[in-house]
Image: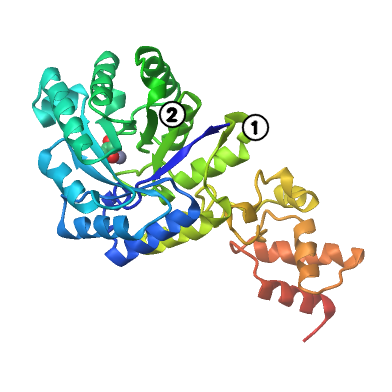
Amino acid sequence: MKQIQFFDTTLRDGEQTIGVNFSIEDKIRIAKQLVNWGVDVIEAGFPVASKNDFKSVRKIGQEITGCKVTGLARCVKKDIDAVSAALGDTPNGQIHVFIATSPIHREAKLHMTKDEVIETIENCVSYAHQKFEHVEFSPEDATRTEWNFLVKAIRTAIFAGADVINIPDTTGYTNPEEISELFDYLKDNIPEFDEVVFSIHCHNDLGMATANALAAIQHGATRVEGTINGIGERAGNTALEEIATTLMVRKDFYQVETNICLTKTFEIAKMVSQKSKMQIPNNKPITGTNAFSHESGIHQDGFLKNHATYEILTPQSVGVAHSSIPLGKLSGSHAVIVKLEEMGYKIDKETTKDIFIKFKAIADNQPIVSDDDLVQIMNEIQGVA
Ligand code: KIV
Ligand code: ZN
């Protein structure tokens, strides 16, 4: 079975989230937890960006074992030198260099012609390769780049020594059909496609980062990049916990393996949420508090008969303790009686109807019926003062 590498950029692209600034200690803790979770590569930061970024990349490179550690560099000598100073002498150090290739970036940002971009790629990738055995190259804004020029840029990087080619959907512009076609085109037009690792790096501006990354995996990517909880620039990056869980739940479809230890997913998500001071939204797939909660009577009844009616994975498989069936106005009598029995009450058929009438009267006026509310209902039913 094909192996998919996980490249985590929580500490680099994730830290580009407005308001997020991890301390060096937090970065080390997160990096250690990422290794426990099973990622293959950690992008530890952008060493040229600040003194602290340099220090944390260097410390992670020195302390973290069990996965590769990379640092980001623009196609600029001083950036490459900074990554080299941070990671060049570490056992697992690598480099990730990028330059934009799309017309809007070439013209408005870089003020470069196509030929100048190609020349820069050649020079910077070969310079990076003098310093590192493994070089990842990203044509930034790849999905808005002319496809024939993208091929030229990628082949230039491969000939200059890159062994990983990352395809960034920098602005979250693409969709799964287009990313599939793009990967098919790259496969058909890059004779060296199978000699290097093709990686996918998506942003979530239109809410398609997970779907786009999965489409790329189906069409030849063997590395996926993203962040924990999907944090990152603007609407964020691909949430790696969603990819890991999908590849496990739908192994029948994707037919790939990963090194991720799925039962540690909730632990890493909670840690990143706490250190980034960003709450996990209640309805976030996999790790949100509602992800394994069942609200309506029909769902609760089905779930109580067989959990698989409404759960496609167990909460325990991603490290969540248990499912929940909060009681509210849409709940049915089955869930109410099961809850009361769990609380130690013995309920006979005759009183079920009366209990449920009282339950509905309370539930209609508040979002959730608490255990205390249930005790009060039972006191009234049993005539306890
Ligand atoms: O989104 C992007 O294009 C990036 C690159 C630096 C890979 O983060
Ligand atoms: Zn990015």
Q: Which mark is residue 237?
A: none
Task: Specify whether 107 is left or right of 56.
Answer: left
Quadrant position of ligand 1: top left
Indicate the quadrant containing the N terminus: top left, top right, bottom left or bottom right. top right
Which residue is depicted at the point 58% across and 61% down? 367
Q: Amino acid at mark 2?
A: Ala
| The residue positioned farthest toward the bottom in the image shown | 385
Q: At which x and y percent is residue 238?
A: 41, 41
| The residue positioned farthest toward the left in the image shown | 111
Q: At which x and y percent is residue 43?
A: 32, 47
Return the residue at label 2: 221
- Element class at badge 1: helix
Q: Nearer the viewer, residue 215 or 124?
A: 124
Q: Please, is residue 90 above or below residue 247 in the view?
A: below
Residues at marks 2 and 1 touching, judged by CB atoms closer than 8 Å = no
Q: Please, is residue 344 above or below residue 364 in the view?
A: below
Label 2, label 1: how many angstroms apart (C-alpha)? 18 Å
Q: Please, is residue 361 above or below residue 128 in the view?
A: below
Task: Specify whether 297 is left or right of 33.
Answer: right
Mark 1: give few (<14), some (14-19) or many (20+) Cα within 10 Å.
few
Q: At which x and y percent is residue 319?
A: 58, 57
Question: Does residue 356 show up?
Answer: no
Quadrant housing residue 25: bottom left
